Amino acid sequence: MSEVLARRYGRLIRLYPRGYRTTHGAEIVDTLLTVARPGQRWPDARESVALAVEATKLRAAGVVNGGPAWYVDGLHMATFLFALGAFGTAVGHSWSSDWFVWPALLAAVFVALLIGKPWLALPFALVEAFGVSRLQLPTAWSLRDELPPFSPQMGTRAELVPFLALLVGVTALAVLSRRRPLRRRSWWWLAVPVAAYIARQALIAWPESPMWLAAVAVGQVALLGAALGWTMVTRDGRWALAAVVFFAPDAVWLRYNRWTDPSPLGITYWVIVGVLLVAIVAAAARPGRRGRPARTIT
């Protein structure tokens, strides 16, 4: 029976960073088994929550205490999420066979940012920005019409902002990463475009459908909630910067469209996003903590 409980505690310990788990994992499991009730087969809910909270603190401390500066890492987070959103939308969309280049371009930008190589993403981001902005380019530029269309061409400048923000972010990161390498992101992020592809094949969601928009909204709110929690733990500004930069294009879009016929759900979403953004910035702005390592258990 204790072996069953030990295995289940061991699964919870996987929430901890690998280095800490290797050093202290067996000790934590032994301590939990010592105080367990006779006949206990499952971890208590309070123990599970405590382990999850402490693991989150340790992971947050690892992010803050290692890698690039907070503003570089924050910009990398926002730019990576731009690429992830664009790639996931492209995979989930029903493009014609002539537009296979578009998802491939976005996949190249996404993977390059995932492995922390923005200079690899830069040429692809330039081509992507050119493709979506061709309608806004001067007609006197002959190259605009010589190349076949390989991407959606945005009709308004507000629709261009996310793609231009991606290009600006990639360019800035290519310059900033010359002194210190960027952090690699988890390959688990590939689950997002994979889920988008599965949804398209199952005819469950399209990028313009209510189900797709609801899934994106829930995912964004969940990420903001996680960013708020990590910011409260560390008082570090990288998650606040990432959140503000990521939602800046949406603010431009809202300003351009002047809240044309907003739905109750849309208003609720933006209220939640606004409250979370203010909370994240306020948590990061509290004096006396930024730049200090997060307190961890020993």
Image (cartoon, rainbow, N blue to C red):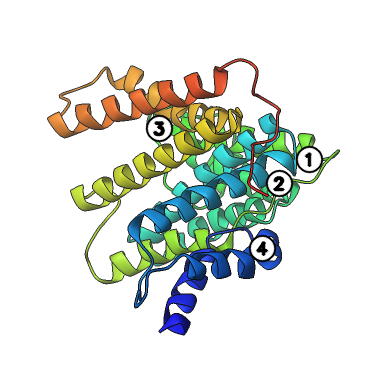
In this view, which residue lies farthest toward the right? 179
Residue 195: percent from left, percent from top: 37, 64
Residue that label 3 marks: 159
The span from disc 3 to disc 1 (Cα, nearest Å) is 28 Å
What residue does disc 4 label?
24
Q: The residue under label 1 is which amino acid type?
A: Ser
Mark closest to the chain's N terminus, 4 or 2: 4
Callout in the foreground (4, 1): 4
Residue under pointer 2: 118
Q: Residues within 10 Å of mark 3 (few under 14, many from 20)?
A: some
Residue 114: in sight, yes or no? yes
Pick the residue in front: 222 or 86: 222
The mark lying in front, picked from 3 and 1, is: 1
Residue 54 percent coordinates (x, y): 53, 49
Above/below status of 16 relative to 263: below
Contact (CB < 8 A) between labels 1 and 2?
yes
Q: Which of marks 4 and 3 is nearer the N terminus?
A: 4
Residue 139 visible in the current orientation: no
Residue 278 percent across, percent down from the top left: 42, 20
C-beta proximity under 8 Å, tags 4 and 1: no
